[in-house]
Amino acid sequence: MTRRDLLPGISPDSGSPVTVAESHRAIRRARFRAALRDISQIFLLVGVDYFFVVWPSAHVPMLDRGSSVIVLAVLNSIVMSHILLSRLVPRMTAKRIAATWSLRERARFFQTGSR
């Protein structure tokens, strides 16, 4: 079976779409807010870890210190994997969708650049 380069109904000679709104400012603002949210989550995580290390009697109620350290390590890994996956999965999906674009659309996208 041959691979189809384009979506059904799309020809390689199709013209560029008409720009209705410029979204560069909104995209920049959304990226800034996402980065700020990620940084604040990491600072909160580091702060809790620091508090846990500095104060030796800190523990999760009804758990001993060793079990509390395990719970803290699991929660750290969950938060860090959430931060990483929330950035990587949309990027991989966008690459998969962009693979269906015609050469003209790709040239237009790379010509404007990501501002």
Image (cartoon, rainbow, N blue to C red):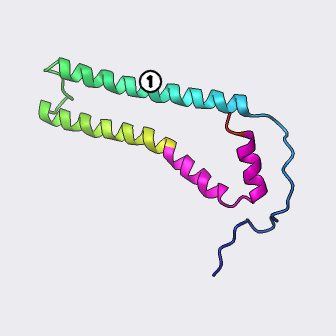
Q: Residue at x 74, y 34 (%)?
A: 23
Indicate the quadrant where residue 97 lies. Answer: bottom right
Question: In the image shown, does 66 or 112 lie closer to the viewer?
Answer: 112
**Residue ranking furthest to the bottom:** 1
From the image, tell me which residue sits under label 1.
40
x, y percentage for residue 69? 19, 33
Q: Main secondary structure of the magenta part?
A: helix
Is the N terminus in the top left, top right, bottom left or bottom right quadrant? bottom right
Question: In the image shown, does 109 or 10 lie closer to the viewer?
Answer: 109
x, y percentage for residue 62? 17, 32
Q: How many marks are shown on the rendered structure?
A: 1
Above or below — where is 63 with respect to 85?
above
Residue 64 belongs to the span the image colors magenta: no
x, y percentage for residue 89? 51, 49
Residue neighbourhood size for the residue with mark 1, other residues' Cα within 10 Å, grouped as few (<14), some (14–19), many (≥20): few
- Left or right: 100 with respect to 92? right
Find numbered disc 1 in the image and state the secondary structure of the residue it sits on. helix
Is the C terminus in the top left, top right, bottom left or bottom right quadrant? top right
Above or below — where is 45 with respect to 9?
above
Residue segment shown in magenta: 88-112
Indicate the quadrant where residue 29 lies. Answer: top right
Mark 1 is on which residue type?
A: Ser
- Left or right: 45 with respect to 39? left
Question: In the image shown, does 3 or 77 lie closer to the viewer?
Answer: 3
x, y percentage for residue 77? 32, 40
Q: Residue at x 34, y 27 (%)?
A: 45
Report if residue 110 is visible in the image.
yes
Residue 90 belongs to the span the image colors magenta: yes
Report if residue 64 is visible in the image.
no
